Amino acid sequence: MSNIVAIVGRPNVGKSTLFNRLVGGRVAIVNEESGVTRDRNYGKSVWNGKDFSVIDTGGYVSNSSDIFEEEINKQVLLAMDEADVILFVCDVELGITDLDYSFARMLRKVTKPVYLIANKVDNGERLYDVHEFYKLGVGEEIFPISSINGSGTGELLDKLVSHF
Ligand code: GDP
Ligand code: MG
């Protein structure tokens, strides 16, 4: 497989909402076996005639906010191994947290393209909250988006498929 985008970030930033918006229901692998802990989900997407796959790395182990370095390492290593492009999702509603800094520290070592997604920018007012995310010092570019209403996702998709 190639043309793979991985979505990483702490719980509740909107990774799965973004995943669903990108794949629009085209989930590729569903493991129905009970007792199997799925720590990732794969979907397929197409934009401007280019096919790619999306991995939602988090939230299948635990939906709780108490995730630790181990879980962060797991997510980032998985993304580094499998993906061509990594989306690091943050949340303008809550702002930057310690967990975001932990992700940023690890992601700075990644040589693949990393984009910072400032999610939950549902309206123009929230654009003012995007600047603080430059403090994280990670990502080639910041994309303000709303995974709920879709704003900004077209620009993000244009950038993603430019790699494929
Ligand atoms: P995950 O834990 O990172 O996968 O986050 P989820 O996708 O489960 O979303 C966590 C919460 O944030 C849910 O209540 C979503 O509805 C909400 N959410 C996700 N994206 C947005 C967004 O763009 N705007 C707003 N206002 N809420 C969002
Ligand atoms: Mg999730």
Image (cartoon, grey):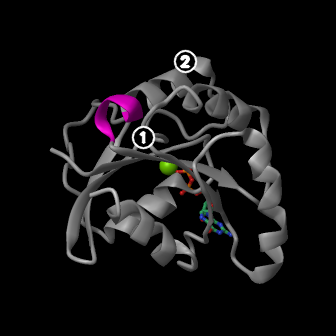
Percent across and percent down for residue 36 are: 27, 31
Residue located 25% across and 36% down the image? 34
The relative height of residue 88 versus residue 50 in the rendered view (above or below) is above
* Amino acid on which the number 2 mark rests in the picture: Glu
What secondary structure do most residues of the magenta stretch adopt?
Answer: helix
Residue located 29% across and 35% down the image? 82
Query: Which element carries disc 1, helix, strand or loop?
Result: loop
Percent across and percent down for residue 152 are: 56, 75
Mark 1 crowdedness (10 Å alpha carbons): few <14, some 14-19, many ≥20: many
Which span of residues is magenta-colored? Answer: 79-83
Can you identify the residue that label 2 sits on? 70
Mark 2 crowdedness (10 Å alpha carbons): few <14, some 14-19, many ≥20: few
Q: Quadrant of the N terminus?
A: top left
Of callouts 2 and 1, the N-terminal one = 1
Can you identify the residue that label 1 sits on? 57
Q: Residue furthest left?
A: 1
Query: Which element carries disc 2, helix, strand or loop?
Result: helix
